Image: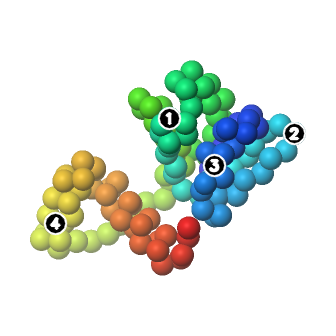
Amino acid sequence: MKVRFPAKEEWIRIFKRLPPVFKINVSDGVVEVDCPFGYEFTRDACRLSVREFARLFRSIEVEGGSKKKKWDKIILEPHKTVSVAVRWSPTEYEYVKKAAESAGMKVSEYIRSCVFMRMIRDLNIE
């Protein structure tokens, strides 16, 4: 997924905190970020006013993904086009389902987040 927005220093700062796997390129007053994973950030973490945060959201263009604004959070997600089938025993699935429910997530979201946490650790992505 490619994310583009005008090169404003306070907006660039938000993406510079990401791991090096997120490639950032600034050219001709436009920032392009190659985002291999989804990313979300809050207005408070960005230290932006409500108006500036709304401006940022409107300015973001996403190719190969989507953007959503939920309260004071911007969510950038790549299009999910690959499906992986996993077989579980009934007991394993019940445990995964309970864990997802306790985290307030769908089972697929929970599994994806667990895989990403493990992947980040195993690949030493910081």
Neighbour class for label 1 at 10 Å: few (<14), some, many (≥20)?
A: some
Tag 1 residue: 43
N-term-proximal mark, 3 vs 4 = 3
N-term-proximal mark, 3 vs 1 = 3
Q: Amino acid at mark 2?
A: Asp
| Pair 4/2: label in front | 2
The residues bearing labels 3 and 4 have C-alpha atoms spaced at a distance of: 36 Å
Question: Up-down: is 117 above or below 41?
Answer: below
Seen in the image, is 15 located left or right of residue 90? right
Q: Amino acid at mark 1?
A: Arg
Q: Amino acid at mark 3?
A: Phe
Q: x%, y% of residue 59? A: 66, 29
Tag 2 residue: 28
> Which residue lies at the image location 76% right of the left edge and 38% below the top edge?
7
The residues bearing labels 4 and 1 have C-alpha atoms spaced at a distance of: 34 Å
Residue 58 appears in the figure: no
Neighbour class for label 2 at 10 Å: few (<14), some, many (≥20)?
A: few
| Pair 2/3: label in front | 3
> Which residue lies at the image location 50% right of the left edge and 35% below the top edge?
43
Tag 3 residue: 15
Neighbour class for label 3 at 10 Å: few (<14), some, many (≥20)?
A: some
Mark 4 lies on a secondary structure that is helix
Tag 4 residue: 95
The residue closer to the viewer here, 63 or 19, is 19
